Image (tube, rainbow, N blue to C red):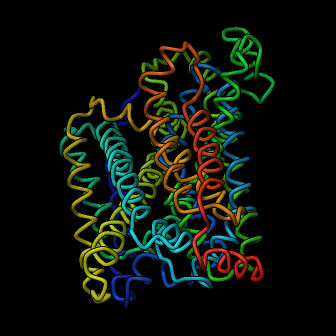
Amino acid sequence: MEVVKINTEIAITFIAYSALMLFIGFYFYRKNKNTEDYFLGGRSLGPVVSALSAGASDMSGWLLMGLPGALYVSGFVESYIAIGLSIGAFLNWVFVAKRLRIYTSVIANSITIPDYFETRFDDDKHILRIVCAIVILVFFTFYVSSGLVGGAKLFESTFGIDYTHALTTGTIIIVIYTFLGGYKAVCWTDMIQGLLMMSALIIVPLVMLSNLGGYEAAINIVQEIKPQNLSMGEGVSLLTIISALAWGLGYFGQPHILVRFMSIRSTKEIPTATIVGISWMVISLIGACFIGILGIAYVHKFNLSLQDPEKIFIVMSQLLFNPWIAGILLSAILAAIMSTASSQLLVSSSTLAEDFYRRIFKQDASSQMVMRLGRIGVLLVALIAFLISTDKNSSVLSIVAYAWAGFGASFGSVMLFSLFWSKMTRMGAIAGMVTGAVVVVAWKNYLAGILGFPLYEIVPGFVCASFVIIIVSLMTKVRPGTQKAYETMLKNL
């Protein structure tokens, strides 16, 4: 039951969808005239594209596979993650978007997150830029790898093809349209992919409800066989709930999401983008949660076999729809994986080309040279991620679990303080960023086990980084010019 039949209709749908994404890449290839075009889309993107791109690049395949699978196994308590993410995303749009957009365009023309941190703290030694670049390259290579593995597993289970061939196919598609089109291609494909993901997450649970005889009938079945899955907190520790909600803290430090704020056409369009982005997110998360819960009832009522809970969406798409529609719905998983992997590839390539090459080694490099190096960066990061992904059971996937926490604690704390505290210093930023990353890794691998304290590592990481930022900033002097630049940003709000 778990493997979708290999048929012409689904194959044609997948090929057509992939061809559309590649066409968009080729189209925008001719539109990129300089590095700001390639890495930020010339800051010309409207609110709808920016918002849906931020959402699609954020969610990845876990939205259609991981989250429904988690609710299938553990029930509504897993929805605290969705609640935490929704709150975090909303606060990110409300508090970070406008200030970051102003600072990276009015104060200085920053086109990457390391760019922003360096100009914000007048870091002429490039220490912040180097620390940022290392964190981005390490965590995003693993992130991209997980996306490639997810895509390979989708192709493998859908068409029954060899894992290595499936991995190669998915990697080539993602790399080509990122390589050619740059930021605009990524954002426009993200918008299409975001709409496809949301549509799938609305349609599938509605059809499931219809086949189950309505919401009450479905919940009654779940109540009989897994009553604990309907509880939001009974028998669940406070630490578990806090850990789930704390996922929202990660948003303040995700480079591939923050860069969407920098590229939006105007700060006046941020409120519209906020409404579009959060509406998309809440609808999609609710749909994903219900697929997991309704899946319990569906599998029981129709006596299905489901060895892998994360394939509940794939199985429902196969059973409930004709092959043409199933092909479109399954393309939504491919969309989720592609949108995230491509965004992370682009941020990684901009880090190599802009943050290392131009800013540190050759400041007079032409835009064309930096763009060429950016494209080489896409190939390089993708190649390393591909090599890591060749073992589908690779332990690297366990590292992805705390990559979100790593970015949230190291970049997120520094980002918030940099936008809201004028007395934050360069040394405070460096110390906070390093502390956040180190505490997350140490907590995940050592401290949580030693202390017997099962708390999501983003919480101690974020708290420790914030504490260090405050202490070190109070002990060191604010650099000349940074105070004035901060006041200029406030005047433009």
Q: On the rendered structure, is 205 left or right of 358?
A: right
- For the N terminus, give its image quadrant: top left
Name the one closer to the observer, 202 or 250: 250
Q: Position of residue 62 (x, y in %)?
A: 50, 40
Identified at 68% across, 63% down, the residue is 423
Rendered-image quadrant of the C terminus: bottom right
Question: Compared with residue 363, is residue 474 higher up or lower down, i.e. above or below?
Answer: above
Rendering quarter of residue 399? top left
Q: Position of residue 412 (x, y in %)?
A: 58, 52
Count of numbered marks = 0
* Residue closer to the observer: 408 or 324: 408
Q: Is residue 465 visible?
A: yes
Does residue 325 appear anywhere in the picture? no
Q: Is residue 156 above or below residue 231?
A: below
Residue 91's place in the image compared with 221, above or below, is below
Find residue 71 and report its image quarter.
top right
Compared to residue 326, the image places residue 215 above or below, namely above
Place of residue 100 in the rendered image (x, y in percent of width and height, measured from the top left):
63, 70
Q: Nearer the viewer, residue 296 or 10?
A: 296
| Residue at x-position 69% and y-position 35% | 245
> Which residue is outermost to the right?
216
In the rendering, at what x and y percent does residue 232 appear? 76, 22
Q: Residue at the location (44% across, 61% down)? A: 128
